[in-house]
Image: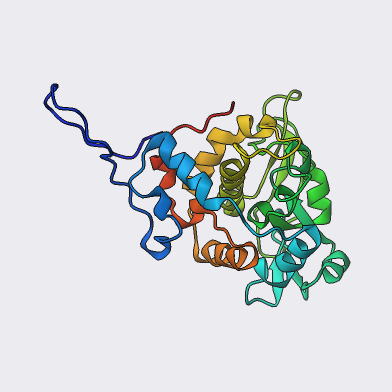
Amino acid sequence: MLLAACSSSDAPTTPPPVNSCTTTPPAAQAAYYDVARNKCGAALLSALQQAVRGQRLLGYTAARDSLYAFVDRGTRPWIVDLYTGREAVGVTTRATAFNARINTEHTWPRSRGAEVDPALSDLHHLFSSDSAANERRQNYPFGLVRGTVLWTSTPPAGQSEVSRLGYASGNSGQLVFEPRPSVRGDIARGLLYFYLRYHTDRPSGYSVLNFAQERDLLLAWAREDPVDAWERARNDAVFRAQGNRNPFIDWPELLDLLPSLPLN
């Protein structure tokens, strides 16, 4: 990946500037990301980690209340399931979500480090999901199914996008879950946020077992499915609920400004 552009002196006898980076945060959120201004490479990564730390601890019950009431609902009379695209009308609470066969998906699996707070209730990686599709996903890594398909979602009337569970290649080996194309960028940015937020502040059980397989594909998905108005509004809603933001939504250029994301 490319690093933020840094200038250097042409004269070999002249010491380099103390700080020659010209990284500029997005104007709309300049104050929030000011700690990352004019930082490059690993220093930029560290500054962003500092920016997103310290969110309000909601707890899992309150987080789901917020998810269904306004984060995934917005101004619509329904929420859209992440994996099938099904519109669930009238979902505003945990009870109405249960009745509509909707639950909460941890895109970074609970068994990989999202089992305890704050990671458990961090809305940036939580999404409303059809309960049957969520059960199929389990804790498999995201990927592209190129071998035997074991399950395919049923798209709503008039739509053709599907999610799939199957083998990454051949008829055996790694099982992966392939989400429908229009949400791949959303999922990627949620997982990149989770890595940024927790990789140096690791909750109990934290593991990059999935992320190590997903990383390069997530970066590609984030470029192929760019940030849209709905995702920006959702980021604002999460900020309203828990007080921190997803830099990969506010500042898409970070995909080119950050160094390779270390796995150790």
Viewed as shown, does residue 228 lie left or right of 59? left
Q: Nearer the viewer, residue 37 or 89?
A: 37
74 in relation to 196, above or below: below
118 in relation to 157, above or below: above
109 in relation to 230, above or below: above
Pinpoint residue 11: horizontal percent, then vertical percent. 11, 25
Q: Quadrant of the C terminus?
A: top right
Q: Residue at x 33, y 52 (%)?
A: 24
Q: Nearer the viewer, residue 257 or 174?
A: 257
Q: Nearer the viewer, residue 122 or 54?
A: 54
Pinpoint residue 119: horizontal percent, then vertical percent. 70, 48
Q: Quadrant of the N terminus?
A: top left
Pinpoint residue 155: horizontal percent, then vertical percent. 72, 57
Viewed as shown, does residue 221 lie left or right of 58? left
| Number of marks in the rendered image | 0
Q: Is residue 258 visible?
A: no
Q: Residue at x 39, y 41 (%)?
A: 257
Viewed as shown, does residue 67 lie left or right of 191? right
264 in relation to 255, above or below: above
Query: Quarter of the image holding residue 201?
Result: top right
Pinpoint residue 204: horizontal percent, then vertical percent. 75, 37
Q: Is residue 227 visible?
A: yes
Chosen colour scheme: rainbow
Q: Residue at x 13, y 22 (%)?
A: 13
